[in-house]
C-alpha cells in the first residue's frame, strides 16, 4: 500500500495514455532546433500536457456536464497538438516514424476522450446526486 489516495481520473486509460504521450513528446522535442526552444517546442509540450491536466481538473467538478466540459477542452488540446506535429513535420524537425507514433497515440487518445465525453453527458448520476444518496 502506497499510503496516498489514487483518484478516479488516475485510473482512466485515457489519462495514463496522455501521460505517456507527454513523455514521448518530450523525447521528440529534444531533437528540435534550439531556435524553437520557446516557440514550437513549448507550444507542443504545453498542448500535449494540457490533455492530462484537463482530465484531472475536470475530475474535481461535481457535475457531469462540468466534467464533460474539461474533457472537451482536453480533446481540443489533442487537436492543437496535431497542428503542432504537422508543422514540425513540414519543417523537418521530426522523423517520420516519430510523427507516425505520436499521431497514432493522439488518435487513440482522441477516441478515448470522445467515448468519455459521451459517457459523461449521458450519465445522470453526478457527484452531487451520489452525495445526496449517502
Image (cartoon, grey):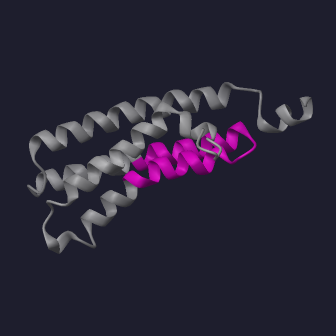
Q: In the image, is 114 to the left or to the right of 68? A: left
Q: In the image, is 29 to the left or to the right of 42? A: left
Q: Is residue 67 magenta?
A: yes
Q: Is residue 23 above or below residue 101?
A: below
- x then y, percent, for residue 53: 51, 52
Quarter of the rendering containing residue 64: top right
Total labels: the figure holds: 0
- x then y, percent, for residue 97: 12, 39
User: Which stretch did the figure color magenta?
Assistant: 48-77
Quarter of the rendering containing residue 79: top left
Q: In the image, is 53 to the left or to the right of 37? A: right
| Residue at the image position 65 percent from the left and 31 percent from the top | 121
Q: Main secondary structure of the magenta part?
A: helix
Q: Is residue 23 above or below residue 29?
A: above
Q: Is residue 124 above or below residue 99?
A: above
Q: In the image, is 83 to the left or to the right of 2? A: left
Q: Quadrant of the C terminus?
A: top right
Viewer-nearest residue: 63 or 133: 133
Amino acid at each position: 500500500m502506497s499510503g496516498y489516495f489514487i483518484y478516479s481520473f488516475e485510473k482512466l486509460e485515457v489519462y495514463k495514455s496522455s501521460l505517456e504521450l507527454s513523455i514521448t513528446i518530450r523525447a521528440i522535442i529534444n531533437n528540435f532546433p534550439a531556435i524553437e526552444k520557446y516557440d514550437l517546442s513549448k507550444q507542443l509540450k504545453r498542448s500535449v500536457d494540457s490533455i492530462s491536466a484537463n482530465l484531472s481538473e475536470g475530475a474535481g467538478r461535481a457535475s457531469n456536464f462540468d466534467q464533460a466540459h474539461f474533457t472537451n477542452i482536453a480533446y481540443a488540446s489533442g487537436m492543437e497538438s496535431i497542428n503542432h506535429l504537422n508543422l514540425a513535420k513540414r519543417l523537418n524537425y521530426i522523423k517520420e516514424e516519430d510523427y507516425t507514433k505520436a499521431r497514432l497515440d493522439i488518435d487513440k487518445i482522441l477516441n478515448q476522450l470522445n467515448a468519455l465525453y459521451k459517457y459523461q453527458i449521458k450519465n445522470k448520476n453526478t457527484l452531487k446526486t451520489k452525495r445526496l444518496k449517502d
